[in-house]
């Protein structure tokens, strides 16, 4: 059973990511402040932290579209469809999620790993991608 405080923290974090995605779709410019990591549980040196991340899928984007973590961390990903029918897949990380599902992924190597919508969802389907950046 989940604690109300933890649920509130996850919802608040999702809201921060959702609001940070508003505005210019071109992410090539520097943002005014550094984007927060999915949770504050990451140790300062090295990995080993647990990140609870709820990915909100709408027509036709994911929020957050970028997730940062460290080698050795574990991501606990949950997919929530707010609009349309979507899934998430990443062959590189072995991710395969449908709406409402949760999967834990141990991040064992550095790199940028793409995830994409795994359900054909309409005209913007090909643009539904995100990245997990492991440092």
Image (spheres, rainbow, N blue to C red):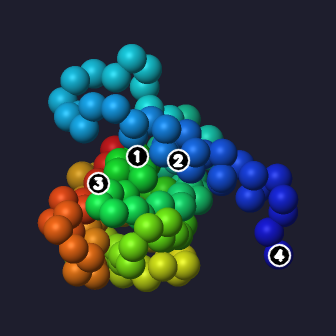
Q: Where does label 2 land, which residue?
A: 38
Q: Where does label 4 land, which residue?
A: 1
- Whether residue 70 appears in this view of the structure is no
Give me the residue at 24% from left, 52% from top: 111
Which of these two is toward me, 87 or 85? 85
- Whether residue 33 appears in this view of the structure is yes
Tell me how far mark 3 sits from mark 1, CA to CA: 8 Å
Tell me how far mark 2 sits from mark 4, CA to CA: 21 Å
Q: Nearer the viewer, mark 3 or mark 1?
A: 3
Q: Are marks 4 and 3 in contact (CB under 8 Å)?
A: no
Could you tell me residue 16's position as x and y percent?
Answer: 55, 39
Tell me how far mark 1 sits from mark 4, CA to CA: 27 Å
Give me the residue at 39% from left, 17% from top: 32
Q: Tell me the element at label 2.
A: loop
Q: Where does label 1 land, which residue?
A: 68
Query: Image quarter for residue 105?
Result: bottom left
Q: Are marks 2 and 1 in contact (CB under 8 Å)?
A: yes
Q: Are marks 1 and 4 in contact (CB under 8 Å)?
A: no
Q: Is residue 133 above or below residue 50?
A: above
Q: Name the quadrant of the N terminus.
A: bottom right
Q: Where does label 3 land, which residue?
A: 131
Could you tell me residue 108's position as x and y percent?
Answer: 36, 63
Q: Earlier in the sequence, mark 3 or mark 1?
A: 1
Q: Are marks 3 and 1 in contact (CB under 8 Å)?
A: no
Q: Earlier in the sequence, mark 2 or mark 3?
A: 2
**Callout 4 crowding tier (Cα within 10 Å): few <14, some 14–19, many ≥20:** few
**Extreme residue in the top direction:** 32
Tell me how far mark 2 sits from mark 1, CA to CA: 7 Å
Tell me how far mark 2 sits from mark 3, CA to CA: 13 Å
């Amino acid at each position: 059973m989940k604690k109300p405080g933890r649920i509130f923290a996850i919802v608040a974090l999702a809201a921060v990511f959702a609001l940070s995605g508003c505005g210019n779709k071109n992410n090539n410019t520097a943002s005014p402040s550094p984007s927060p990591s999915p949770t504050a549980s990451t140790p300062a040196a090295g990995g080993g932290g647990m990140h609870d991340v709820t990915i909100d899928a709408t027509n036709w984007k994911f929020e957050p579209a970028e997730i940062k973590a460290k080698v050795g961390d574990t991501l606990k990903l949950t997919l929530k469809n707010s609009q349309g029918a979507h899934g998430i897949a990443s062959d590189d990380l072995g991710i395969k999620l449908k709406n409402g599902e949760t999967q834990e992924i141990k991040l064992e190597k550095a790199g940028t790993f793409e995830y994409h919508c795994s359900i054909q969802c309409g005209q913007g389907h090909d643009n539904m991608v995100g990245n997990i950046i492991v440092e």
